[in-house]
Amino acid sequence: MVPEGNERLLWEATLWATDVVIASPLYWYSVSATTKRYLDHWSGWLRVEGAPLKERMRGNPVGERAERV
């Protein structure tokens, strides 16, 4: 199911981003609730039928871009 409302805006921004930097303060050795919720959305978006998120992530390992900079 394609996200709706504010989640859809976040989904579209994530799909079109060339890079995503996740920064969060640590609370009791865990990320903030807002960051956790965003990461939880990602796991749901990976299961959206026909969504290009998985394909966009594939072939772009974490850190590969940073090493070239």
Image (cartoon, grey):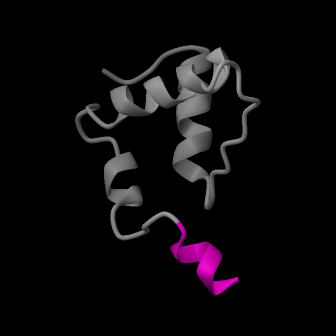
Which SS type dominates the magenta stretch? helix
Q: Give the image quarter of residue 18.
A: bottom right
What quarter of the picture does the N terminus occupy? top left
Left/right of residue 19 with respect to residue 11 in the rendered view = right
Residue projecting furthest to the right: 25
Nearest the eye: 44 or 12? 44
Q: How many marks?
A: 0
Q: Is residue 52 above or below residue 37?
A: below
Q: Residue at x 61, y 28 (%)?
A: 9
What quarter of the picture does the C terminus occupy? bottom right
Q: Is residue 45 above or below residue 4?
A: below
Q: Residue at x 76, y 30 (%)?
A: 25
Q: Give the image quarter of residue 23.
A: top right
Q: Is residue 36 above or below residue 56?
A: above
Residue 52, can we see it?
A: no
Q: Residue at x 63, y 59 (%)?
A: 19
Nearest the eye: 49 or 43? 43
Is residue 61 within the magenta segment? no
Q: Give the image quarter of residue 27.
A: top right
Residue projecting furthest to the bottom: 68
Is residue 64 within the magenta segment? yes
Left/right of residue 35 with respect to residue 43 in the rendered view = right
Q: Residue at x 62, y 53 (%)?
A: 17
Nearest the eye: 10 or 27? 27
Q: Which residues are magenta?
A: 63-69
Please provide percent x and percent y for residue 12. 56, 38
Please provide percent x and percent y for residue 58. 33, 62
Please provide percent x and percent y for residue 37. 55, 19
Residue 21, can we see it?
A: yes
Please provide percent x and percent y for residue 51. 33, 41
Left/right of residue 58 with respect to residue 3 in the rendered view = left
